[in-house]
Image (cartoon, rainbow, N blue to C red):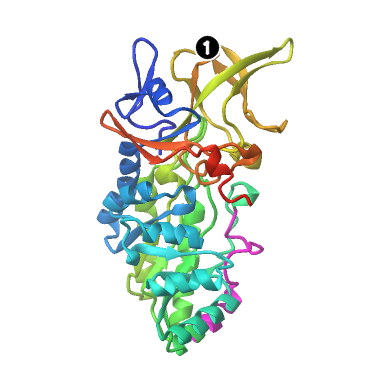
Amino acid sequence: MSTVKPITLTRHLEGELEVGGIDLTELAQTYGTPLYVLDEATLRDNCRAYTAPLSQHYPNYQVVFAGKAGLNKGILNLIAEEGLGVDVVSGGELYTALKSDVSPDKILFHGNNKSLEEISMALDHQIRIVVDNGQELKNIQTLCQQKACTANLLVRLKPEIEAHTHDYIKTGHIDSKFGIDKRELIDIISFIVDTPELKFLGIHGHIGSQIFDVEPYLDLVRIMVGHLVHIKSEVGVEVEELNLGGGIGIRYIEQDDPPAIDLFIEKLTTLLKEELKKAGLKEPKLILEPGRSIIGNAGLTLYTVGAVKPIPGIKDYVFVDGGMADNPRPMLYQAEYTFELANKAGKGKPYTIAGKYCESGDVLAEGVLLPEPSVGDVLAVYGTGAYNYAMASNYNRCQRPAMVGVFGGHSRVLVRRETYDDVIRYDL
């Protein structure tokens, strides 16, 4: 996560970029563009950036990948090989996880408005559910009674921490749509403990996403341990699982300064053990839910330049064959990325990178320094592993891109490119 680019990225003396032992221009020619590229070596390295220090500092742990960052069967099979589970937030994500190599006992089901059908699917496969509100808890109880089964539950709290991130990705503050107010906590947990069909496992707190500061996580530890003390005092139970969420940021541009994962984990677990010992509590299983820090810099997107359009005295546009439908984050969050031409080295003058969609706001970046681009050049955009494929759409009835994995000089299709027939498949 300390690098913007995949760890296998190199540039030949001739100027061509290579990832996973494969020339990016050749990948573009073989599979077409836009193209999502996933470097398997970087993905595995990011998984181990969590599991290695946790094994050393807090062996009773489980890392679950925040699947909303980018989820398909191929990605899940890779993270399963690294020992990770996955958290899912919809029936579609849950179904995908169940069809992958991830063990069901390593799947967590989140969400603030789970449907009865989604809850039923989770119960049928004994998936742990993170309860968001009282109505959901009633729905779970009713379905358990109908199915004569037991639900394994964590309770999601609003930790009331204001992390410095974009307003749309803050989830821990008091007015967030996610989680239960601390004033409801004891009543909710008491209900679970007193209900035969329900089993209380622990509590969950998540403060947001793309966070560079470790201090809010240390505050979260103190707050959550305080809740553990309160739960033991009022309900008489010690939690089995403590889920501290995810949200550590990554470097999208060189100026970004995310914390080192090993140091973050060392500080987090050291404080957690100290606070638990001080409170006289046993050490629960620690669950962390990283998303973009697992997959973000493992992914990049390739585009083909279709035109260069100068506006004298104002700016020079570079038009690419994708844009807001395969990467909506610049429009949604004013997100910034790092760009390079895959077939030309060096930096020249600034260009505005614009997509092909019928929106004036379909601009991926302003002021990108590039050597003089030509029609047919391949443009690489780094750090697109997270929330690009996951948020892609068929806007303007365009086909969503393919995704290929690269490793050791070989490539394989993880998601095939959509066709026009796919686009109209459900039209009547």
Q: Is residue 410 above or below residue 237?
A: above
Q: Report the residue at 39% width, 58% height from top.
A: 97
User: Number of callouts in the render?
Assistant: 1
Quadrant in which the N terminus appears: top left
Residue furthest to the front: 428
Q: Position of residue 142 (x, y in %)?
A: 52, 84
Q: Report the residue at 63% width, 62% height from top.
A: 176
Q: Position of residue 168 (x, y in %)?
A: 63, 50
403 or 386: nearer the eye? Answer: 403
**Magenta segment boundaries in residue numbering:** 170-190
Which residue carries the number 1 mark? 371
Residue 392 seen from this side: no
**Local secondary structure at mark 1:** loop
Q: Report the residue at 38% width, 63% height from top.
A: 107
Q: Is residue 234 above or below residue 60?
A: below
Left or right for 55, reference 364: left
